[in-house]
Image (cartoon, rainbow, N blue to C red):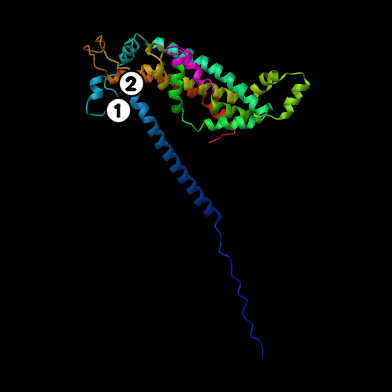
């Protein structure tokens, strides 16, 4: 029998339009960017809205603030609210200037001593070899799992027994050591190659000289971020100074909680009733230095945390 030959059918591959695919991907990328930036803009507005409301409320009259109609911009800008706030003292006579001095003194001393202690502790845990080092570091990390509020009662009893109440000492000593900052700096120290230590020893440097002349300059971004965060933490201290000291020995954040009133009649008829607009002005004055500090130093904070190996 003669075989029947089937026709050789060659199927052509469908034509792929490269230009059309590029346009499709470009449109998809544009739509994705529009969605992402719209979402981020919306989140930024939500985050900024409370600050905006605080600022405009500090510039309103008390009558405008309390009226039912919501206004997004003051009808009359009252810069005098800030003047009234600055001239008022608390019932114990503690003025804004005195509490500002308390805050700067406590913040400066605690920041300097805290950074020195953090450097020495991190160096010992990163470079020195002694028995029980890893166990000690594990216990230190374990204390980070305990909320700070649980230390408040024991610290209060200890401060009372030592007669440290109503002093600068009790505002500085309990917060000199930070396990978190020690952990950050230790990670940074451990990233420095050991060959630098050996070279420093050949040049005749001591361990302290190696720490000061080599390790500290190499970890400057982390140290700057630790210094800034330490000072910001001192500036924002509220619960502990309020609990342990009277108003003359408190911090600037405690000053904004007192009732501000226009008992001298500088804004109109004299009133002994606390005015919300004055309190908003006080909050703005306390928040402004930290806002400026963060704006100009945010890159150092981000860089220091990223170099420590704890991104996220």
Residue at x 43% of width, y 37% of height: 40
The quadrant in which the N terminus is found is: bottom right
Sequence-wise, the earlier of marks 1 and 2 is 1
Image coords of residue 264 (percent x, y)? 25, 9
Q: Which residues are magenta?
A: 160-177
Where, by quadrant of the figure, is residue 199 drawn? top right
How crowded pointer 2 is (Cα within 10 Å; few <14, some 14-19, many 20+) is rated as: many
Residue at x 58% of width, y 29% of height: 183
Image coords of residue 260 (percent x, y)? 30, 16
Instruction: Identify the residue at the far bottom of this view.
Output: 1
Image coords of residue 38 (percent x, y)? 42, 40
Q: Which residue is label 2 attached to? A: 280
Task: Residue 72: give its label.
Answer: 1
Left or right: residue 117 compared with residue 296: right
Dot 2 lies on which element?
A: helix
- Nearer-the-camera pick, 75 or 161: 161
The answer to whether residue 192 is above or below residue 262 is below
Instruction: Identify the residue at the far right of this view.
Output: 202
Image coords of residue 41 (percent x, y)? 41, 36
Q: Examine the rendering and report whether any part of residue 240 can be seen.
A: yes
Dot 1 lies on which element?
A: loop
Left or right: residue 101 compared with residue 210: left
The answer to whether residue 17 is above or below residue 45 is below
Q: Examine the rendering and report whether any part of residue 235 can be seen.
A: no
Residue at x 55% of width, y 27% of height: 179
Q: CA distance from mark 1 to mark 2?
A: 15 Å
- Nearer-the-camera pick, 50 or 90: 90
Q: Give yes or no for residue 277 being in the magenta stretch.
A: no
- Nearer-the-camera pick, 308 or 164: 164
Left or right: residue 34 compared with residue 21: left
Where, by quadrant of the figure, is residue 269 drawn? top left
């Amino acid at each position: 029998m003669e075989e029947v030959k089937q026709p050789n059918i060659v199927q052509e591959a469908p034509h792929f339009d490269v230009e059309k695919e590029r346009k499709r991907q470009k449109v998809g990328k544009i739509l994705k960017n529009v969605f992402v930036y719209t979402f981020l803009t919306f989140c930024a507005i939500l985050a900024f809205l409370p600050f905006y409301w605080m600022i405009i409320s500090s510039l309103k009259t008390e009558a405008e603030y309390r009226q039912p109609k919501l206004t997004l911009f003051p009808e009359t800008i009252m810069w005098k609210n800030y003047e009234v706030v600055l001239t008022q003292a608390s019932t114990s006579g503690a003025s804004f200037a005195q509490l500002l001095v308390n805050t700067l003194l406590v913040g400066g001393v605690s920041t300097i001593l805290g950074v020195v202690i953090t450097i020495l502790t991190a160096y010992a845990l990163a470079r020195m070899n002694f028995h029980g080092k890893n166990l000690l570091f594990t216990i230190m990390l374990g204390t980070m799992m305990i909320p700070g509020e649980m230390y408040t009662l024991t610290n209060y009893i200890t401060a009372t027994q030592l007669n440290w109440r109503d002093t600068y000492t009790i505002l500085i000593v309990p917060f000199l050591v930070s396990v978190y900052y020690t952990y950050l700096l230790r990670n940074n120290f451990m990233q420095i190659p050991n060959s630098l230590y050996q070279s420093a020893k050949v040049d005749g440097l001591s361990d302290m000289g190696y720490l000061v002349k080599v390790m500290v300059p190499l970890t400057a971004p982390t140290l700057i971020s630790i210094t800034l965060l330490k000072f910001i933490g001192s500036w924002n201290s509220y619960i502990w100074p309020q609990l342990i000291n009277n108003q003359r020995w408190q911090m600037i954040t405690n000053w904004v909680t007192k009732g501000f009133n226009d008992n001298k009649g500088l804004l109109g008829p004299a009133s002994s009733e606390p005015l919300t607009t004055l309190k908003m002005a006080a909050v703005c004055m306390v928040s402004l230095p930290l806002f400026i500090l963060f704006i100009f130093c945010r890159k150092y904070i981000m860089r220091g945390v990223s170099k420590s190996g704890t991104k996220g």
